[in-house]
Amino acid sequence: MVIRAIALSLALLVGIGTIVPIATESVEAGKTKKRQYKKKKSRNWRGVKKYSKRWWQLYRAQERRKRASYARRRALRLRPMRLAKVRKVQAETTNVASAKPAASEKKGAAILPSGQTAPTGWQPGAQSGSEVLFSVDGGRGTAAISVVGPANGETVDTGRNRTVGGVPTSALRREVINRMIRENGWVVNDYQKEVGSKKVYVVVAQSQGAGGRLNSRMFYFTEVDGRIYSLATNTNVDSAERIAEESEKVINSLQPKARPVQQASVRED
């Protein structure tokens, strides 16, 4: 009987010793510490002392990325406005082109966008959009004058960053290359020269015409009164030199003429 009582007492003690700690852990009252998560910094900034040389390098790089991102967003916002401006310029050129053929029919000669008479042998052609088309070399060749777009700055003809009215010549050359690819042609050379008092960017190309004959393609780009004009000719190789001379005369006619300066007369007593 005594042994049974002792065994029961030991069992109760073991059970109580096991249950009490478990219950205490689960229901213990008190403040629970919330785990705070710190904002993770970029790996590049980890372990960098604030305002140190490395810190300023990372800071300036971060600011450059912010400015570049802002510039991209701004360019996307301004793109519709620039396209609208280009369309407006093209529409004005179309209106001028539509008005010139009537005058040329009366006078019996082709009229350039500048209002001057075209070189001998240049006849008015069918109008196409914003281009003023001419038939040259007795109908065996064509010439087209158009406005590429508004100028964005000054013309630069030295160094790597050569421009025409602020537009890189590499972009203009790329347009000619794309056109030659569509028309089964190829670019031969490009250079800048002075025609009259203006710098002109010239791209020389060739293409294969009907019957396998070789055609000479010349593209002239110049800036006049805030616009970039393009003159493109397509003629036979035999008459290329003569058409090039006539094309330079046309380019020169587009340049704004200097106005005479009026001087006030001084009255002597």
Image (tube, rainbow, N blue to C red):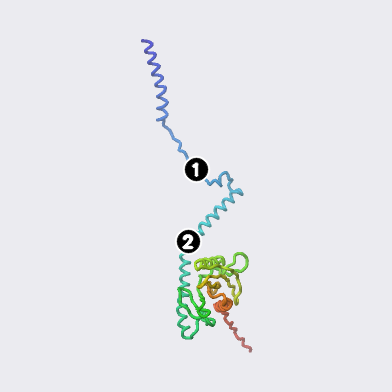
Image coordinates for residue 234, horizontal then vertical, percent: 53, 74
Position of 21 with respect to 224 (left or right) is: left
Image quarter of the N terminus: top left
Label 2 element class: helix
Mark before the other along the chain sequence, 1 or 2? 1
Can residue 255 be seen here? The reply is no
Within 10 Å of the Cα at label 2, are there few (<14), some (14-19), or many (20+) other Cα atoms? few
Where is 121 relative to 149, above or below?
below
Rendered residue at 41%/20% (across/down): 14
Q: Secondary structure at mark 1?
A: loop
Kind of residue at badge 2: Leu
> Which amino acid, by three-letter code, is at mark 1?
Lys
Nearest to the observer: residue 163 or residue 185:
185
In the picture shown, does residue 20 fall above or below 88?
above
Q: Which residue is mark 1?
A: 38
Most extreme residue toward the top, as rendered?
1
Where does label 2 land, which residue? 76
Question: In the current view of this chain or complex, which residue is farthest to the front?
Answer: 211
Which residue: 54% across, 45% down? 43
- Rendered location of residue 147, percent (x, y): 50, 72
| Figure quadrant of residue 11 | top left
Q: Nearer the viewer, mark 1 or mark 2?
A: 2
Q: Residue at x 48, y 80 (%)?
A: 124
Q: Are marks 1 and 2 in contact (CB under 8 Å)?
A: no
Between residues 51 and 260, which one lies in front from this camera angle? Answer: 260
Tell me if I can see residue 62 in this picture.
yes
- Residue 40, percent from left and from top: 51, 44
Outermost bottom residue: 269
